[in-house]
Amino acid sequence: MSTTTAVVRKNTYYDSVSLMSVSTKANALDGVEQAFTAMGTEMNKGVLENLGLLTEELRAAESGDLMIVLVAEDGADTGALLSGVEDLLTRKAPASAAGGEVTYRTIASAAAGIEGANLAVIAVNGAYAAREARKALESGLHVMMFSDNVTVEDEIALKNLAHSKGLFMMGPDCGTAIVNNVALCFGNKVRPGSIGVVAASGTGSQEVSVRVHALGGGISQLIGTGGRDLSERVGGIMMVDGIRALAADPATDVIVLVSKPPAPSVEKKVLAEVAAAGKPVVVWFIDGSEEAVTAAGGHFASGSLQAARTAVGLAGLAPAAAGEFDAEAAAAQVAARLADGQKYVRGLFCGGTLCDETMYAVRDAGLDVWSNIQKDPAFRLPAGSASRGHTFLDFGDDDFTNGRPHPMIDPALRIERIVEEAKDPEVAALVLDFVLGFGSHEDPVGTTLPAIEEALRLARDAGRHLEIVAYVLGTDLDTPSVAAQSDALRAAGVTVTLSSTETGQFARAIAKKAQA
Amino acid sequence: MEDHGDTVTVPVLSGDARLLDLLEPLRGKGSVHSVFARVVNLLTPDGTLIALAARGSGDAPRTLTADVSDWSAYHLSAGLGVTFATGNVSVDGRRLRLATVGARAWRPAAPSLAAPPPGVVAAAADALDRICRAHGPLGGMLGAAPGAGPMERAVVDALHAGRTTLLDAVRDGGAAPVRLGVLALLGLGPGLTPAGDDFLTGLALVAALPGSRLAALRPPLREVLAAHGRRTTALSLATLHEAAEGRVRSELLALVALLATGDPGAALHASVRKVLAIGHSSGGDTLSGLVAGLHLEEELRGSL
């Protein structure tokens, strides 16, 4: 026969986060038949009365009192169970009615205060980030370090420490990860699945994950490494650990690697892991070459869309059918509307890899491209400089973010630039990206639309057609959804492309025809 | 934060204008009512419950937002004495003084739903409902969470029954049935602001909008709050008193203002998300009340 125990704590306040989660956790304790924690209001007491559980003590409870009701199984130690429930209550610090969150002042207190925690996300000033990451690793936590401006010496030391402990050290400057279906920082909401990603490029990995989702596939894990991981000095420590982890993961059938081309010695090391993975590995080394990848048994991808399509196919899924985009025909229609002198494409990007993919597409057509992230110093354009010819700016690069939030969070600088570029009579087209996801601006299109409308008005008043091309990186599961953001752009007269690769193809076709 | 000798003076960044006006001439002793990480509730000398929120909490009725990240450094506890004098609030024995001089006055203004043509309000309510059901937390007005125990399920059943009773009563328009409907929800739910009260807050807000067809809800609601206030928590009672006057948290007002435009568009998701972030389930439960109120508004418009 079960035993009912009731306790009333006078004038004790917990918000509903604590009380409901405590009830749920208490119900899962061995020996508990049912448990309930609630404020002592008349209606809550009425519910207990209907269930035959209202004791005299509970009847005397008032609205400001906390009731704990415990029905224990026959033979259970009710004293110990009640202690267990009270322990759950005291473990939860009283929280605010406004937010419900608890602020931990140190990594160690957070690690101790959150049962089962095994990963720390570190996003503090770079000067302190390494110290905090070391504490986290020493507390047995994997680390995702969003912070940048961490020295390469610290990065190497942290990655070696993590490797020695069997932990991940993702970052520094790691903006995206998906761990056990939970997207971190700039990650998108995608379907769980059998494709694992290891990436040294934040928006590159986002693009691959959303394309996989759009093609009907899903993501098992997305492991970020930080942009410097494949440099000669760091040596790909995290990339190698990531490949090995996914190779050993039974939920991962196909692995995708995303990175700028590694340093030669590191490429050799990474491709050795590809050969030894025992699973198909798709390699998208942005602007990289095919030969070495193929020799190692990897599947080379020349762009994000091809990487996603190949991975989905290797996972045994038939990629959802999509009509091929005829960039040349679309660009011909644009070119027909341009005035004399309109000959250049200007790309204003929040995502570095999205900028890369479009910029390289235009460059590969034999055209000169200028950029703040150009590898060729002769065509490098410092932040703050006026555009020249075909210009592609990555507003997420350090030059633009020094002392400012990333443009995926605060797009103000790019918004100003949209209007500036529209005043230039040589500009034929503006190319923009909008990156959705958990850490991104809550309505990137909405906040940019006034500038887009102003740009179009300026061109119209000057008797010019200005083509604005935009790509929205996101999924139907993101909030806001990719469809809602794309619809808002189309309604404003913007041409919306459906992938980063397609954006590059369209920009290249426009650039060729406008300059012809 | 300035440190003058032993006492730390924390500036108040913004505050409910009505509360700032009340504090200016207020003299006397109150007390700390309850302490949370980012909100501390105080009782003024006349027993009014007010809130001190940490920065970034968003403006709300009877609330001062102070320039602190949280209150943990001040070691506050329920029962400590509080001195009110010349717009300043000092917690006895904790060398903490809050200065309201220079605080931005927040004046909540409830928008009118008169502008949107017939059908638009219902469409807005449908959109709101869809988002709320897709993203709102379970355990209250949106139904029981998976694995909920028998007691939680009993609360959810009672919430459903109370909702039906109240909405039927508002449709019929009789004050006595409405009072019974309000009493069926008041104080129902485990937390500090019970789910039934959150639902009433959303419904009361619609009733308080200029030109609302639900205006007849307000007198019996006020009567119940006056006569049966002890049936719920002090914080929830204060929230309901204010909601009956159309005074609710800024996130909720912003959402209603967006709906009142008749074309919330892509901004709706972001606005709803801010409301859903209030408490654990409070935001979702309040939105349930708002959705029910908007549907009733449309229904009652059509019956005129």
Image (cartoon, coloured by chain):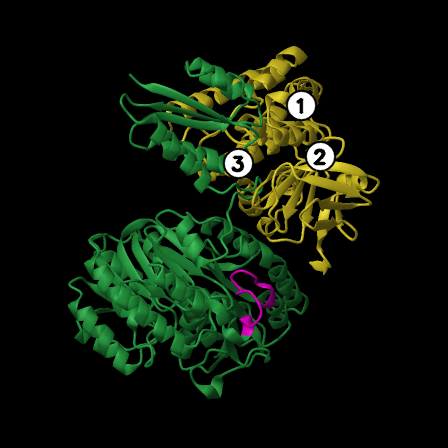
Q: Nearer the viewer, residue A98 or A25?
A: A25
Q: Residue A42: x and y, percent?
A: 55, 19
Amino acid bearing label 1 = Leu
**Disc 3 to disc 2, how far (Cα)?**
32 Å
The reply to whether residue A462 is visible in this rendering is: yes
Label 3, secondary structure: give it.
Answer: loop
The chain coloured green is A
From the image, give the main secondary structure of the stretch colored magenta. loop
Is the Cβ of the residue at disc 2 closer than 8 Å to that at disc 1?
no
Q: Which of marks 3 and 2 is in front?
A: 3
> Circle 2 sits on which residue?
B112
Give, as a single range, the part of the protein colored magenta: A400-413
Query: How far across and how far down the image is residue B141, in percent?
Result: 49, 28
Residue A45 drawn above or below residue A493: above
The answer to whether residue B110 is seen in the rendering is no
Residue A408 is one of the magenta-drawn residues: yes
Q: Which residue is drawn at 52% across and 65% down?
A: A406
Q: Is residue B33 above or below residue B158?
A: below
- Who's yellow, chain-wise? B
Q: Which chain carries label 3?
A: A
Q: How crowded is mark 3: few (under 14 residues within 10 Å), some or many (20 or more)?
A: many
**Residues tagged by mark 3 and mark 2 found on one chain of the structure:** no
Residue drawn at point x = 79 percent, y = 51 percent: B101
Report the front residue among A249 and A69. Answer: A69
Q: Mark 1 belongs to which subunit?
A: B
Q: Quadrant location of the N terminus of chain A? A: top left
Say which chain tag 2 marks: B
* Residue at the disc numbered 3: A15
Question: Mark on residue A7?
Answer: none
Is B32 inside the magenta-drawn segment? Answer: no
Label 1: which residue?
B214
Compare residues B298 and A176 and report the one nearer the observer: A176
